[in-house]
Image (spheres, helix red, strand yellow):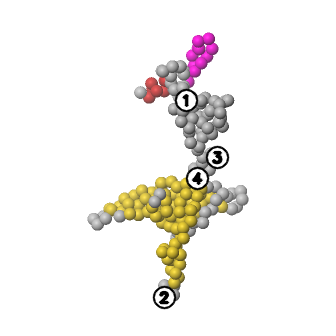
Amino acid sequence: MLARMVGNHCDLRPRVRPGARGGRRGCHRPGPRAVHPAPGPGLDDGRRRSPGLRGAGGGRGDGAVDGGGRRVPAQPRGPHLMFHQSVIRVRAGTKTDRGGNVVKDWASASKALIGSLSVQPAVQSEESDPTRTAVVTGWRVLSAPGTAPDIRADDRIEHAGMVCEVEGEVAAWPDPLTGGVHHVEFVIKRATG
């Protein structure tokens, strides 16, 4: 099966044979038995608008349409393509207990939206004993280059409707050119059961 697929695709094994006018052409055949289907209406290569059409902006989301004539939604661009997520930082307030000590007060916690992040799955584990089954799920959170969000190890993070704990210290990666912070990384975890 793989040999047949390789034999039919020009990117994997190029084949050049004479064309109808004696010139050389690639392995693509026109018609219903084509190796690659023809691009949709208004698209020259399946991704960009053909020149001269209204709204031709040169990429997906700039007035482009898919093969069915539907508009393609705009997509993030540039070097920060993956940093489009956000979380809510929950920071505990403080209160004085009966002994005169300053302690955390989660009832008076403050919340702040932290954006320009990439939240990626990192840890999934399940531990069971005769009385319960504990499920631990974790995510690695990276900030966009050039940003240093205010996150501390004692904060809680709300992500996808779940409240997670920051595990360990927040790592600030240095920028080798400026000496400042390039980006920040930390791990959040949630345990249930």
Specify the principal SS of the magenta part: loop
Measured in 3D between alpha carbons, the distance from the residue under mark 3 to the one under mark 1, in whole angstroms, is: 26 Å
Q: Earlier in the sequence, mark 2 or mark 4?
A: 4
Looking at the rendered image, the quarter that the N terminus falls into is top left
Question: What amino acid is found at the position of numbered circle 3 in the picture?
Answer: Gly
Measured in 3D between alpha carbons, the distance from the residue under mark 2 to the one under mark 1, in whole angstroms, is: 73 Å
Numbered tag placed on residue 173 in the rendering? none
Where in the figure is residue 149, as x and y percent of width and height? Answer: 61, 63
Name the residue carrying label 1. Answer: 40
* Furthest residue in direction left, as rendered: 130
Question: What amino acid is found at the position of numbered circle 2 in the picture?
Answer: Gly
Q: Earlier in the sequence, mark 3 or mark 1?
A: 1
Q: Is residue 65 above or below residue 174?
A: above
- The residue depicted at 53 percent of the width and 36 percent of the height is 70
Between 164 and 54, the one lying in front of the other is 54
Q: Earlier in the sequence, mark 3 or mark 4?
A: 3
Q: Earlier in the sequence, mark 2 or mark 3?
A: 3
Q: Secondary structure at mark 3?
A: loop
Question: What amino acid is found at the position of numbered circle 4 in the picture?
Answer: Phe
- The residue depicted at 54 percent of the width and 65 percent of the height is 89
| Image: magenta residue range | 14-26
Name the residue carrying label 2. Answer: 99
